[in-house]
Image (cartoon, rainbow, N blue to C red):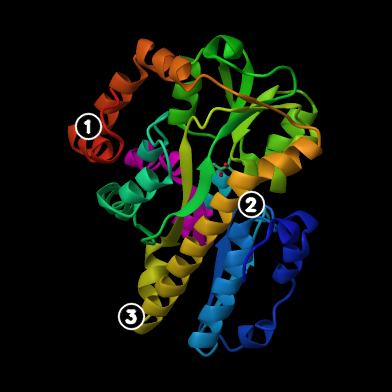
Amino acid sequence: MNITRRKLLTGAGAGALALSMGRAFAQKAEFKYKYANNLPVTHPMNLRAKEMADAIRAETKGRVDIQIFPNNQLGSDTDMLSQLRSGGIEFFTLSGLILSTLVPAASINGIGFAFADYDQVWKAMDGDLGAYVRAQIAKANLVAMDKIWDNGFRQITTSTKPILTPADLKGMKLRVPPSPLWTSMFEALGAAPVSINFAEVYSALQTKVVEGQENPLAIISTAKLYEVQKYCSLTNHMWDGFWFLANGRAWERLPADLRAIVSKHVNAAGVKERVDVAELNATLQKDLAAKGLVFNQTKADSFRGQLRKAGFYAQWKAKYGDEAWAILERSTGKLA
Ligand code: X2X
């Protein structure tokens, strides 16, 4: 199924999450697992996850039934991470930058302006850097599936003014996800970052608790942030993805043949979701402008220069260590 912008924007895809025929299997499933995420039902992540759950249910002949809980239904990202660790839920898709509160190395793909394009992203994340991070995640008794799902290159939106250079960020109350790297980066750029879980972002913007936030266009669109923001400044300041995580004990409880089926379909769904998200992020500007969002280009070198001047790269190279930083720079070129 090709997730078209029309289907996304009309929310027709949301119907795909309606109670599935699979309910009939739920009663007899040996393994009834919960998969939670923080994205709207119309985001490609949930449209592909529905296909994935149906394919797993079919190929395991109903033995594995994955129930999807989208859009923060089970709580905030920090709540859901706790539930994943305790086994309250068995699967959860989470940005490595938020996971870094538990697995510090998991935020390394979010280093400001590290990746110039998707070729560099997938070379790193499907290569040595992804393997390194997954090994670190395993030490926390979590299992990260091989193919990280795409969130995208992030842009800054505000309700007050366009952002052209870091000077425009000075003292700005900007929402960032709860993660030391996000806070550090926007402090280095001169802003006043405020850590807020995604579940509360729309209302925080609407009530002017914060004047801006940063996210890829697919999120700005599916979460309807254009309703409470006026400007979108195209910074591409960070690439971010979602690790598809499993609780270690729950994963081991699955027999090897079922684990192979589940991981096959999860990874296949992740690769399809990447195509969907990249297409949306490349084409949504026109739809969002029609909804009133005012776009501007930015001077990337001025942001990168400010990060260097503030010692951001040197600080994070020291935090990750030489091994991880060398793996990152093999894909990005010299950063610090
Ligand atoms: O919280 C965010 O901004 C989001 C939805 O992009 C993440 O999950 C990192």
Which amino acid does the dot numbered 3 rest on?
Answer: Ala
Q: Secondary structure at mark 3?
A: helix
Is residue 46 magenta-colored?
A: no
Residue 66 visible in rendering:
no
Q: How many marks?
A: 3
Q: Report the quarter where the N terminus lies.
A: bottom right
Q: Secondary structure at mark 1?
A: loop
Q: Is residue 95 left or right of residue 54?
A: left
Disc 1, disc 3: CB below 8 Å? Answer: no
Q: Nearer the viewer, mark 2 or mark 3?
A: 2
Quadrant in which ligand 1 is drawn: top right
Tag 3 or tag 2, which sits nearer the N-term?
A: 2
Q: Residue at x 34, y 57 (%)?
A: 141
Q: Position of residue 171 (x, y in %)?
A: 60, 10
Residue 2 visible in rendering:
yes
Which amino acid does the dot numbered 1 rest on?
Answer: Gly
Tag 3 or tag 1, which sits nearer the N-term?
A: 3
Instruction: Find disc 1 in the rendering and name its residue.
Output: 321
Instruction: Find disc 2 in the rendering and name its residue.
Output: 39
Whether the residue under disc 1 has CB within 8 Å of ligand 1: no
Q: Residue at x 75, y 58 (%)?
A: 6
Instruction: Find disc 3 in the rendering and name its residue.
Output: 256
Is residue 86 magenta-colored?
A: yes
